[in-house]
Amino acid sequence: MTRSAAQTLNHLEHASESDLDVREDATPVHAADRPDAAWWRHAVIYQIYPRSWADADGDGMGDLPGITARLGHLRELGVDAVWLSPFYTSPQADAGYDVADYRDVDPLFGTLADADAMIARAHELGLKVIVDMVPNHSSDEHVWFQAALADGPGSAARERYLFREGRGEHGELPPNNWESVFGGAAWTRVTEADGRPGQWYLHLFDPKQPDFNWEHPEVRAEFESILRFWLDRGVDGFRVDVAHGLIKEQGLPDTEEERTVMLGHAEHEVVDGSAVGEATAGPAAEKPRIDHTKRSPMWDQDGVHEVYRTWRTILESYGTPDRILCAEAWVEPQERAVKYVRDDEMHQAFNFDFLTAAWTAEDLRAVITSSLRAADSVGAPSTWVLSNHDVVRHASRLGFAPGTPRMNGISATDPQPDRALGLRRARAATALMLALPGGAYIYQGEELGLPDSTDMPAEFRQDPTFARTAGAEIGRDGCRVPMPWSADAPSLGFGPSERTWLPQPDVYADYAVDRQVGVPGSTLELYRSLLATRRELSLGRGSLAWVEGYGDDVVALTNGSSQRERVLVVTNLGPAPVALPQGAHVLVSSAPLLDGRVPTDTTVWASWA
Ligand code: GLC
């Protein structure tokens, strides 16, 4: 079909639904990008969690040589780039997000030479490489923090972190009431050289992750140098961890929040009486309304933007093709979130609103529209993401009823997701995501339809959240289990031995890569088809317009660049199958059609003749 977005489609004949009047919205929600748009504006980026992708040496922990050996999988899959979670020197108190040396590789993962080899191999295969940068905090074993401890109160070394005197008569109370994202106080008191309890230091996460003082010029200079170190080694960009946390409100005032989350709003400001707690994944109507005018003193302070403006100039000094920055910023509302991707700051930011949207057509349409509008307002591409190493995988998340509160991990005693339903919806959700203009992120294993491990015995759990909340928060281990590559091999082909740092559920054998390659209808083959078609039709650069006439339970849109055919995308979230317009030719479908119609929880991409 070569109709323009503005053209109203004629009344179409349908196999079974004579009253279906499919019309394309007159106004595109989002205009097509230029054909020569920079690579990152439409790239599909695959997240590797290095601990869990591939283990070359058999110690049960993934490593860089393992990754290098398996990169062909990504070439076959058809992604543009890979983002690796941290592999730097680290005591691994938070799985590598506690960095002791930003310029070296932890022996668990290999050596700097292994990193170079990995980058070189990826480039040979046409894959760009994005590494994780963790600027909000270091490990407590970082040389700077060790110096801060040794040099004592008032020393220059303490200035690089956030040390304060305690409150109370003897300084026995933390300097303010902030809580750690992982549970418990965000402050830890140190024992000074004389053996007495002394100052406190801030850690928004684990006590082994002290927050840097980003008002300090040496901290800024150090990170600029670290960026150059990796850029010089050839990386194509950085995913910036906790990008909204670097700057704290002057004076570190108490927060009025009852509980600190990663969002830049105060949770107590729920104004409709809903329970205070985790963000919900419910439909818009069920979501607590947040007063966004109240900002947390630790998140999304305006001062962070100056940091990223400087970083952008450093990346730009490396010329083309662009090296990029992607913000992990749990910031609401979207108008504030897109400040991170203004044209002199970062290139991309994760779209967590899409990830947390409920599985309802209403919510999906709303979040797609608002995401594109917000990104368009600053000239940035939107991004889309459904899973990562911090959340329950979407194949499990969507196996619960829409509106189920968002969970931080699932244990054997929790209600269990419906695995078949979750996979069916996950495939439909991914097919919708990959049809959208902008960039997209895929988390390792989702191309296999992997569910979370939902019955991991407590003794295996490593996420600090689990221990810091005495098990009240299950944590993120369930989505971090090592990849199944070969159903019949030791550790399902993860490595040459039986060892895996987290246990693989038995059911993972059914999802192994070798069970899916070349199998029509497998999730892996679905992802390959989606990615190939997306590339062929330039959907990442396309223009999106809503298609009216399908009713409330269906997300229907067209996407395409003006010179090319437009693709009709139909995601049916309602109970009854829906018809495709006459003449529609199915390109990809997330599940088999039913008498030529799109069944429940299915996404179809179709062209019109
Ligand atoms: C980010 C990471 C998460 C980590 C946290 C602290 O949210 O994605 O895994 O625990 O930052 O670094």
Image (tube, rainbow, N blue to C red):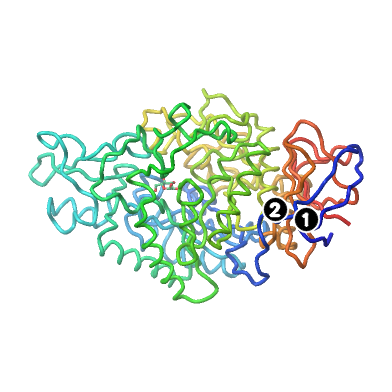
Placement of the N terminus among the 4 image quadrants? bottom right
* Side of 560 where 317 appears, left or right: left
In this rendered view, identify the residue nearer to me: 543 or 151: 543
Q: Residues within 10 Å of mark 2 (few under 14, many from 20)?
A: many
Q: Label 1, secondary structure: give it.
A: strand
Tag 2: amino acid: Ala
Q: Is residue 366 above or below residue 80?
A: above
- Residue at the image position 73 percent from the left and 56 percent from the top: 559
Determine which residue is flagged by label 1: 567
Query: How many marks overall?
Result: 2
Placement of the C terminus among the 4 image quadrants? bottom right
In this rendered view, identify the residue nearer to me: 607 or 523: 607
Q: Residues within 10 Å of mark 1 (few under 14, many from 20)?
A: many
* Side of 468 where 559 appears, left or right: right
Tag 1: amino acid: Val
Q: Position of residue 575 (x, y in %)?
A: 76, 30
Q: Position of residue 400 (x, y in %)?
A: 61, 30
Q: Is residue 200 above or below residue 530?
A: above
Which numbered circle lies on residue 242? none
Determine which residue is flagged by label 2: 435
Q: Position of residue 183 (x, y in %)?
A: 35, 35
- Residue at the image position 51 percent from the left and 59 percent from the top: 65
In this rendered view, identify the residue nearer to me: 126 or 312: 312
* Most distant residue in the left direction: 194
- Residue at the image position 69 percent from the left and 43 percent from the top: 427
Q: Label 2, secondary structure: give it.
A: loop
* Side of 202 where 97 appears, left or right: right
Q: Identify the mark nearer the N-term, 1 or 2.
A: 2
